[in-house]
Image: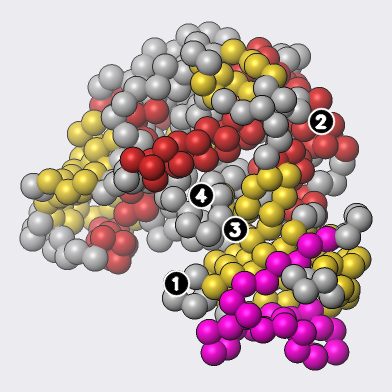
């Protein structure tokens, strides 16, 4: 498995031509020169050019490494977070560790932070959730973030060695079924945004809880059959989590199975009538909370802008939805006649959705592709029931989606887990609830 703490490379920014920032303390360049203070980086003539705070060119090459002195950090201005999601915005972010600047195959710049795994984790858990969240929750999150990363890197290495790909799409007659895992990043191990794990440097570490959680669980992993678990997680399940194969490939994972996000058992969604009743109800569930004090402790400020996450509604006119589907799919379906769920997972998340138009009918999946096709950003989840309103001649006029949850629904429900911790559950109890058939092991 793993015997010592690794360093990892985190992709902070991709496909850029310029960045500005500051070295907070001395940073050593490849030729042993030291640089401190504000800096600018530009791409020109197939080279990366680093300028100091006077505008003087310091170095010009295709790859630049800047290594920190003791306690030095670096700051980057205007880092985009939430890329292509509805909360996308820019932030100033400060990082520990080494700054690496490298050109990709199209001669755009990639900005990479090389850092020890445990330092990375302290930022991840405070970037994913508020550092005021309960300590036992943050400890649980440290363990799953650590486990997910190492399991993912191990799987990626194995896939490369075997010549495999880690994601769809699969196209068949009348069907487009895509599932996106961690596409194999060529120049770094993991990206800094929601596609992998949110990582916003030390600027998010506003209290000692995050560091405490990482330190007290150092080297602890969730395992199954002596293998590190691929510990998926999401914001809010909506009352039921889902199976791994509902969102990714069709191979079941024993510890990523549907569970009730509740002390009482909720049965799986098996029919469209079940789904409609479920999405229009307000069942007992850990993530069914509107307590602002609780949510302030759990969610970062920009996630608090999403208030209706347990049950939500989105309504489109037919023309609006036709335009979104045409824009996202690149296909002209003609007049939209219907959207019909044809397969659901146990949480009610749609795995396959039939889109019927006057010119074309296609079934799409899995859950993330459905969320992408039906929104200019992303739907909160694919757990929704469809209501179609018609005019007097029977032509659809509006499509109403009544939905549940936020995210893919597999593994740990972040809001539910935090509420469990507030009610007194330990990190181990939380993890055993969401990841059944697993155990904790300290590996370094």
Left or right: where 379 falls relative to 142: left
What is the number of the mark on residue 215?
Answer: 2
Q: Is residue 158 left or right of residue 193?
A: left
| Residue depicted at x 64% and y 47% | 8
Q: Residue 195, which numbered label?
A: 4
Q: Give the residue at x 19% y 53%.
A: 396
**Magenta-drawn segment:** 39-68
Q: Is residue 93 above or below residue 361?
A: below
Task: Give the alpha-carbon distance from disc 1 to disc 2, as whole Å.
Answer: 38 Å
Task: Give percent across and percent down for residue 274.
Answer: 31, 21
Instruction: Give the residue furthest to the top.
Output: 264
**Residue 59 lies within the magenta run:** yes
| Mark 4, other Cα within 10 Å: few <14 / some 14–19 / many ≥20 | some
Q: Which residue is mark 1?
A: 105
Spot occupied by residue 365 in the image (x, y as percentages of width and height)? 27, 43
First-in-chain label (1 vs 2) = 1
Judge from the rendering whether residue 300 lies leftward or rightward of residue 276; answer left or right: right
Mark 3 vs mark 2, CA separation in Å: 24 Å
Q: Is residue 72 visible?
A: yes
Secondary structure beneath dot 1 equals loop
Q: Which residue is mark 3?
A: 11
Contact between labelled residues 4 and 1, with CB atoms less than 8 Å apart: no
Mark closest to the chain's N terminus, 3 or 1: 3
Disc 3 on helix, strand or loop? strand
Q: Earlier in the sequence, mark 4 or mark 2?
A: 4
Nearest the viewer among 441 and 252 is 441
Q: Residues within 10 Å of mark 2 (few under 14, many from 20)?
A: some
Q: How is the image coloured?
A: secondary structure
Alpha-carbon distance for marks 4 and 3? 11 Å
Foreground residue among 386 and 333: 333
**Which residue is found at the position 8% from the left and 47% from the top?**
173
């Amino acid at each position: 498995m793993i015997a010592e703490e690794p360093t990892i490379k985190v992709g902070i920014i991709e496909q850029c031509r310029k960045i500005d920032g500051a070295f907070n303390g001395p940073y050593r360049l490849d030729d042993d020169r030291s640089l401190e203070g504000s800096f600018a980086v530009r791409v020109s003539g197939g080279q990366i050019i680093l300028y100091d705070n006077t505008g003087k060119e310091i170095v010009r090459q295709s790859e630049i490494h800047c290594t920190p002195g003791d306690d030095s950090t670096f700051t980057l201005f205007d880092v985009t977070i939430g890329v292509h999601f509805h909360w996308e915005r820019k932030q100033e972010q400060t990082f520990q560790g080494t700054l690496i600047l490298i050109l990709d195959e199209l001669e755009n710049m990639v900005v990479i932070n090389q850092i020890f795994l445990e330092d990375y984790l302290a930022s991840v858990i405070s970037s994913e959730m508020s550092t005021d969240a309960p300590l036992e929750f943050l400890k649980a999150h440290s363990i799953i973030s650590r486990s997910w990363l190492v399991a993912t890197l191990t799987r990626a290495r194995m896939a490369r060695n075997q010549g495999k790909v880690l994601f769809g799409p699969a196209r068949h007659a009348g069907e487009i079924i895509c599932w996106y895992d961690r596409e194999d990043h060529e120049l770094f191990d993991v990206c800094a945004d929601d596609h992998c794990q949110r990582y916003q440097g030390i600027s998010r570490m506003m209290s000692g809880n995050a560091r405490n959680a990482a330190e007290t669980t150092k080297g602890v992993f969730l395992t199954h059959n002596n293998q590190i678990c691929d510990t998926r997680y999401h914001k809010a399940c909506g009352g039921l989590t889902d199976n791994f194969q509902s969102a990714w490939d069709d191979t079941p994972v024993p510890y990523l199975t549907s569970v009730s996000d509740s002390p009482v058992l909720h049965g799986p969604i098996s029919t469209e009538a079940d789904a409609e009743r479920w999405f229009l109800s307000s069942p007992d569930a850990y993530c069914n909370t509107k307590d602002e004090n609780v949510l302030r402790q759990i969610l970062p400020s920009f996630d608090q802008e999403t208030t209706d996450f347990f049950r939500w509604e989105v309504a489109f006119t037919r023309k609006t939805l036709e335009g979104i589907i045409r824009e996202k799919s690149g296909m002209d379906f003609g007049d939209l006649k219907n959207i019909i769920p044809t397969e659901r997972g146990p949480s009610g998340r749609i795995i396959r959705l039939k889109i019927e138009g006057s010119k074309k009918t296609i079934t799409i999946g899995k859950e993330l592709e459905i969320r992408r096709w039906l929104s200019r950003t992303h739907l909160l989840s694919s757990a929704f029931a469809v209501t179609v309103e018609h005019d007097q001649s029977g032509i659809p006029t509006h499509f109403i989606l009544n939905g549940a949850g936020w995210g893919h629904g597999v593994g740990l429900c972040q809001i539910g887990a935090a509420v469990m911790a507030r009610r007194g559950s330990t990190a181990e109890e939380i993890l055993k609830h969401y990841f059944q058939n697993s155990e904790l092991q300290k590996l370094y």
